[in-house]
Image (cartoon, rainbow, N blue to C red):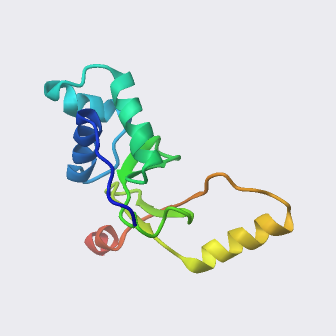
Amino acid sequence: MPAEPMLTANQKLVLDALKEADTPLSAYGLLERLTGDGIRAPLQVYRALDKLILLGFVHRLESLNAFVVCSHREQCHHRPAAFAICTQCGRVAEFLETAVDRGLARWSKGHAFRAERVTVEMRGVCGSCAEAVS
C-alpha cells in the first residue's frame, strides 16, 4: 500500500474526532465537537469528509447519515463495506465477508450491473447489549 497522503489540518481534526468517538457522528455532530478547534462552518466538515472518504479513511453509514473510521483500510478499498449497527448502544462494527462480496459480484455480473459503491448495513443488537438485558 502506498504511503499515507498528507492530510490538511481540517481533515486531521475530523479524522481524529471520528477516531475518538464511540459511535458514528453526523457532519453536524462533528461541527459541534470541532468548533473550538477552528472549524466553524458545515462546508469545512463536508469537504474534509469527502476527501477522507475518497482516501479510504472514513465510511458514510447511509441509514444513519453519519460517519465512522474505516477499520480495514488496507483491505476494503475495492470491496463492499459491511457494518453491524447496534440499535441499543449505537456502536458500529465493520466487517469483511467474502461470501457477501461474491454474492454481490455474481448478481451484478448476471444483471449487467456495474456497482459504483456498495455499503451493507445490518441493524440489530450487539452481544454486549444482549448480555446486559439477559
Res 31 quadrant in image: top left
| Quadrant of the rendering where the C terminus is positioned | bottom left
What residue sits 76% from the left and 73% below the top?
Answer: 106
Q: Residue furthest top?
A: 41
Q: Position of residue 123 (x, y in %)?
A: 49, 60
The N terminus, quarter of image: bottom left
Q: Is residue 78 above or below residue 14?
A: below
In the image, 82: left or right of 40? Answer: right
Residue lying farthest left? 36
> Residue at 26% of width from left, 33% of height from top?
10
Residue found at x 20% / y 25%: 35
Q: Position of residue 116 (x, y in %)?
A: 66, 51
Give how far across and how far down residue 48 sits, in percent: 36, 35
State the residue lying farthest toward the front.
Answer: 2
Residue at (34, 74) in percent of width and height: 127
Q: How many marks?
A: 0
Image quarter of residue 129: bottom left
Q: From the viewer's perspective, is residue 35 above or below residue 73?
A: above
* Residue 130, image x, y percentages: 34, 71
| Position of 57 relative to 2 (above/below) | above
In the rendered image, the residue lying farthest to the right is: 111
Q: Please state if 17 lies on the left or on the right of 2 as rendered.
A: left
